[in-house]
Image (cartoon, helix red, strand yellow):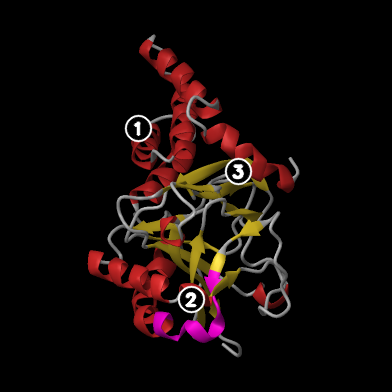
Amino acid sequence: MPESKFSRLAPGLLAPGGVLDKAECTAQRALAAGVRNGQALWRLGDIHRMQGNLDAARDLYQRLSESGPDRLKASWLSALLDGRGLPETPPHGTHPAPFVRMKDFLTTQECDRLFALALARREHFGAARVGDNAEEVGRVKPKARITLELKPRARRDVRLGFLPRIEQVIPEIVARLRLEDLGRYHIEMNMRVYPAGGFYTIHRDSRGGPFRDRALSFICFFHPEPRRFSGGDLLLYDSNQRGGHPVPAFSRIEPFRGGIVFFMSENWHQVTPVECDSEDFGAGRFVLSGHVSPAAGG
């Protein structure tokens, strides 16, 4: 499937009463009728993962890891969704993009402080660019991305306040994802807002050029509660090998205030369209996001 079609595929799958909801009903009916074969359980586990019901998917993969021909793959998936370190050997063939979720990474007070900072710096946000970005080189491409981000001169307080928090957990993330030691590394970080209509089509963060060395990407959510938006889900696509071509299946991660998600920069992902209760700047999807790369010269 051409990559350009993936972003159009997701809304139909995720819509209430859409393809995934209908597929779940069919699978649940089969299980209720006594169909207990592994294929039905696998199908339901994958449906839950694509719906964002990650705990339910984990429980099904755990059951499958106890018996059946794909026990190693099921065990790997269960460990992924449970937040445990991944088994040493990844599954063969198509498999989900590895990621680590951390709940309550930021306190309520830290989220409030970041949101207040975003509102105070509202005039310093501009359209995010796409391409071989050194920010001057990239271009605004509204068909691929609608995101606002802090301009370079307004980022200093964000970096000083939250860079140490990211640095503190990087060794744990590297170990849990079984990445090679990064040695000395460099962190890019910025504050971004997805306003009403905001989105980002399927892409990779290590897409070449000045970004080819990116190893880790992260997204930390700090929107106020109750949320004034829907959508804005992070979809991490399965692939046929590490960093390979994506397939039309994914792990859905809904924005959760104070939480952070780490994943490999080579993995294909997208942000689904955001719908807000108004055009107000403060109604959008607010995140700290960035990338970790080995420092030049090791």
- Which type of secondary structure does the marked residue at label 1 adopt? helix
Separation of disc 2 and disc 3 at Cα?
A: 25 Å
- Whichever of callouts 1 and 2 sits on the residue coming sooner in the sequence is 1
- Which type of secondary structure does the marked residue at label 2 adopt? loop
Q: Which residue is mark 2?
A: 181
Does residue 85 show up? no
Q: Residue furthest bottom?
A: 297
Residue at image point 51% right, 57% down? 195
Q: Which residue is mark 3?
A: 94
Whether residue 205 is situated above or below residue 187 in the rendered picture? above
The amino acid type, in three-letter code, at marker 2 is Asp
- Left/right placement of residue 191 relative to residue 241 reads left
Separation of disc 1 and disc 2 at Cα?
A: 33 Å
Q: Residue furthest right?
A: 2
- Check residue 150 for magenta coloring: yes
- Check residue 81 for magenta coloring: no
